[in-house]
Image (tube, rainbow, N blue to C red):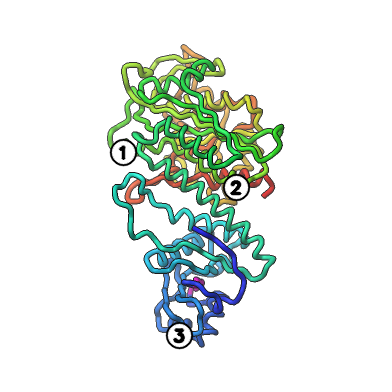
Amino acid sequence: MEFAIKTGKPEKQRAGCVVVGVFDKRRLSPQAEQLDQAANGYLSELLKQGDMDGRAGQQLLLPRVPGITADRVLLVGMGKERELTERGYRQAIHTMHTALAGGGTKDALCYLPTAAIKGRDLAWRIRDAAQNLEALEYRFETCKSKKDDNRPPLKKVVFGASDQTESAAAKTAAAEGKAIGGGMNLARELGNLPGNICTPSYLAEQAHGLGERFTSVSVEVLDEPAMEELGMGSLLSVSRGSREPARLIVMQYRGAAQDEKPYALVGKGITFDTGGISLKPGPGMDEMKFDMCGAASVFGTIQAVAELGLPINLVGIVAAAENMPGGKATKPGDIVTSMSGQTIEILNTDAEGRLVLCDALTYAERFSPRSVVDIATLTGACIIALGHEMHGLMSNNAGLANELLAAGKSAHDRAWELPLGPEYDELLKSNFADMANIGDRSAGTITAGCFLARFTGKFRWAHLDIAGTAWKSGAQKGASGRPVPLLTRYLMDRAGK
């Protein structure tokens, strides 16, 4: 979708549709009042007749309003003006998109971002609107024999600004929102692909594709012999039962000086997870194609950062493997040696995400990173703890944890910090190796974080458990694209944007 900024009176603008807000009890927004005055009270008269009262979720599409240059006027209900939240604002943007997507409108002039939200300036409101409109345009059609011929015709949204000074900041915000929304859509596309297409090798090909699109991105892919030589026995133990070879994918974005230390993102890329020998139950197993959504979020964030041209260096590391049962598959009780030299007793082969991540984290040391954030659909326990709203966050550095929490709050893509500590770490004791890969049934998300923390002593590290937020089930089944907004906001903050 194309985004632009325009100044001028709303009633004088040429557009397929001009979109304005109406608050609870038929209170017109300032731009709606301007339209109403130009139309000699036409809008307020309709509202008095009961066509709309301004409740959230309502919409009223009006063709050929007298005195208005635009072809149509769309009134969007925004609820109580003083109680408008980020969630309510996003609902209004969604209502606008739904109303226009099924009609003949190809371009719209939108004034919804002028509505006040406590703690959110105009740049935030335009950035968030652009991000969500870009995401709303996404459709998964890659594996369908017939494409949707009824795709929404809406191609361009122009946001109204009051003056040229405001217009400059709004233009930057719209570009940022488009880049973040595009990154989310890339993550969603990779996540939605089935496991027979989106294999570790396929992810490697997609990484090379990013390198071809952006001169600022270089790509290196390690195959299994290369990983064997590095001593990545933990990662390779996961792929042993599969005919699909594992890959360690390294994408480097350079937007700063060559000698400036990079930030690092490490993504869990289990392209399909059967559980291995510790086989998962059959119902719902198809959703285990989403077990690479951590890796997908790394791809999406790399793309967003490259499109924005942030003045930082960034390394994205994806540990990609398929976890399958087979004659050579790792068995419960097997002991493997990680790249760090630490040994691991594998008590459950379905706790495989931490096994690929620990070697990827050790590999990240060579970049002397400013910080490392790993992203993984790691534990079902995180869904029990936090549901499907917030990511779980653990860190060995309070400053980094606070930076990520602030980024999540700013992006409205929130995380919640969980503790780490020796009390939990003791649950990973093994009689036969340096550690076990699981503890008991208690604090499963935290003990998974404690496991990863054992491989992060040389850098500032945080772990995002996105098991509850990476995809949706049921009628809306599909990848969400989270936490690309949080990660991109974190990196924008580091870049001073």
Identified by mark 3, the residue type is Glu
Q: Where is residue 442 drawn, in percent x and y? A: 44, 30
Front one among 433 and 263: 263
Q: Where is residue 301 drawn, in percent x and y? A: 54, 42
- Which residue is label 2 attached to? 489
Q: Is residue 433 above or below residue 62?
A: above
Of all residues, the one furthest to the bottom in this rendering is: 40
- Which residue is label 3 attached to? 45
Between disc 2 and disc 1, the foreground one is 2
Q: Is residue 263 magenta?
A: no
- Which residue is label 1 attached to? 284
Q: Where is residue 321 drawn, in percent x and y? A: 42, 27
Question: Which residue occupies 54% across, 60% down?
Answer: 3
Identified by mark 1, the residue type is Gly
Q: Is residue 199 above or below residue 7?
A: above
Determine the main secondary structure of the stretch shown in magenta.
strand
Between disc 3 and disc 2, the foreground one is 2
Identified by mark 2, the residue type is Arg
Mark 2: which secondary structure? helix
Residue bounds of the magenta highlight: 18-24
Q: Is residue 71 above or below residue 471?
A: below
Q: Which disc is residue 67 wearing?
A: none
Front one among 453 and 100: 100
Splitting the image into 4 quarters, where does residue 262 fall? top right
Question: Total of numbered circles in the picture?
Answer: 3
Of all residues, the one furthest to the top in this rendering is: 432
